């Protein structure tokens, strides 16, 4: 049996026109770390290896934020399409070193360490299921994704959001159907994304014209 290898994947290909700057550069808390740093610190503290899926333009802005800590694998793809494409890029790049991916959008900086532990325990009991945390009826992240049922996505660039792909896979009436299980958690951070401008101050913004509008990862 292949030993289990979990790998955290920060989805950060989006610029976010509503925020006016890349979400990863916005402050997670007033005067604190950026959203990207907060998410990275969560998984570094948990001991999971870390990858960031982003664009060439955003990589130049994000890489200095995570320098000096545990190594980060940068998965760089051009902007365009949606979450399924970002996940497929991670599946392709991490095929040799991961059996499970923890998919975490960069605009969810408030997920707690206890939630990671709860997801880890549940995933080990059902290793072939996709686990989705749910808080008060709202589905969120990180999603724990087993790589094996999605091996066919390696090297592809599928369109659409990941939730549509998961729905299609779970509704198959054959042996290729994937179980998608919701896990109730007492953690509002799993669904509290930074989707609108808020009171938190932003980190230094990119220069005008340096980064264009892009679809959210």
Image: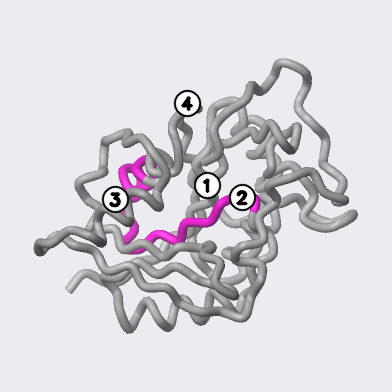
Q: Position of residue 127 (x, y in %)?
A: 29, 74
Mark 3 burial class by Cα count in 10 Å: few <14, some 14-19, many 20+? some
User: Where the N terminus falls, by quadrant?
Assistant: bottom left
Front position among marks 2 and 3:
2
| Residue at the (57%, 76%) spot, across then down | 115
Q: Is residue 163 magenta?
A: no
> 155 or 160: which is nearer to us?
160
Tell me the residue that label 3 is attached to: 95
Q: Which residues are magenta?
A: 88-107
| Residue at the (56%, 79%) spot, across then down | 185
Task: Find the distance from the CA under tag 1 to the CA under tag 2.
Answer: 6 Å
The first of marks 3 and 1 along the sequence is 1
Task: Find the distance from the CA under tag 4 to the CA under tag 2.
Answer: 17 Å
Quick check: 190 left or right of 161? right
Tell me the residue that label 1 is attached to: 11
Q: Position of residue 83 (x, y in %)?
A: 44, 43
The first of marks 2 and 3 along the sequence is 3
Tell me the residue that label 2 is attached to: 106
Q: Are marks 3 and 4 in contact (CB under 8 Å)?
A: no
């Amino acid at each position: 049996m292949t030993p289990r290898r979990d790998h955290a994947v920060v989805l950060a290909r989006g610029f976010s026109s509503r925020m006016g700057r890349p979400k990863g550069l916005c402050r997670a808390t007033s005067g604190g770390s950026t959203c990207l740093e907060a998410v990275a610190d969560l998984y570094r503290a948990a001991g999971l290896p870390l990858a960031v899926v982003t664009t060439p333009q955003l990589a130049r802005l994000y890489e200095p934020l995570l320098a000096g800590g545990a190594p980060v694998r940068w998965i760089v793809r051009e902007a365009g399409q949606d979450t399924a494409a970002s996940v497929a890029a991670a599946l392709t790049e991490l095929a040799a070193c991961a059996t499970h991916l923890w998919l975490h959008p960069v605009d969810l900086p408030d997920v707690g360490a206890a939630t990671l532990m709860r997801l880890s325990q549940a995933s080990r009991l059902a290793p072939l299921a996709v686990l989705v945390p749910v808080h008060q009826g709202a589905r969120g992240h990180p999603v724990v994704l087993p790589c094996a049922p999605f091996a066919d996505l390696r090297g592809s660039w599928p369109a659409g959001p990941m939730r549509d792909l998961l729905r299609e896979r779970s509704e198959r009436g054959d042996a290729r159907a994937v179980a998608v299980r919701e896990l109730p958690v007492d953690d509002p951070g799993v669904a509290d994304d930074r989707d609108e401008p808020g009171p938190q101050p932003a980190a230094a913004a990119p220069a005008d014209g340096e980064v264009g509008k892009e679809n959210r990862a």
